[in-house]
Amino acid sequence: MGGMRRNAHRYDVFVSYRREGGFETARHIWHYLKDEGYRVFFDLEDLRSGKFNTKLYSVIERCTDVVVVLSSESLDRCQNEDDWLRLEIAHALKHNKNIIPVLTRGFEFPDKSDLPEDIRDIVNYNGLHPTPESFDYVLSSLAEDYLVAESARKGSWVRKEVARALVLAVVLVAAFLARQFPRASIPQCRRHPAFH
């Protein structure tokens, strides 16, 4: 259980999708965000041994963002209480995650009343509508405008800038102190005759 908790901490973004119709889009999102420095959970790559339901719930709880890839008719099976797409969406909603629906070609939200109560709120989330022509732009927008998590690259850049600012501050303080307190003559120490 301890190893599972350590792994769950290392993700910023959880990608939820239905394999039929959503796998390729989900995989592209995972690759793109990973390359941009985000720690992204993608079940086929990151799910290891242990109870997968416990692992999935744990990762969702610790992630900041949940990207939900919605392909044509992907919500139809959500009427089943044990449907994993439904369970992932419901868990993300329950834990107030930043949910970003990615609506692929052919997807349309059903009437809210046609959805199970535990996932009805998904229709209220602003989503992205990628097309083959706009896919790169949509991925960039997802990372820059929709995700709450900070990219490790952005975090690394921020840390470098903070370090530079601290070094500059130390240099300026040292220069200021040098002007305020010029070197006084330092008394010479007498050498002991034995060391001449």
Image (spheres, rainbow, N blue to C red):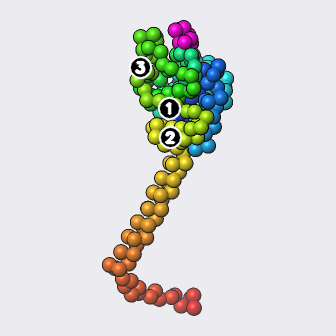
Q: Earlier in the sequence, mark 1 or mark 3?
A: 3
> Where is residue 6 drawn, in percent x and y?
57, 32
In front: mark 1 or mark 3?
A: 1
Residue 78 falls inside the magenta stretch: yes
Circle 3 crowding by C-alpha within 10 Å: few under 14, some 14–19, many from 20? some
The residue lying toward the viewer, choosing from 181 and 116, is 116
Residue sitting at the far top: 80
Would residue 130 be seen by someone viewing this image from the given angle? yes
Residue at numbered disc 1: 128
- What amino acid is at disc 1? Leu
Q: Earlier in the sequence, mark 2 or mark 1?
A: 1
Element type at marker 2?
helix
The residue lying toward the viewer, choosing from 104 and 186, is 104
Residue occupying image coordinates x 63% and y 37%: 31
Residue occupying image coordinates x 39% and y 87%: 185
The residue lying toward the viewer, choosing from 66 and 196, is 66
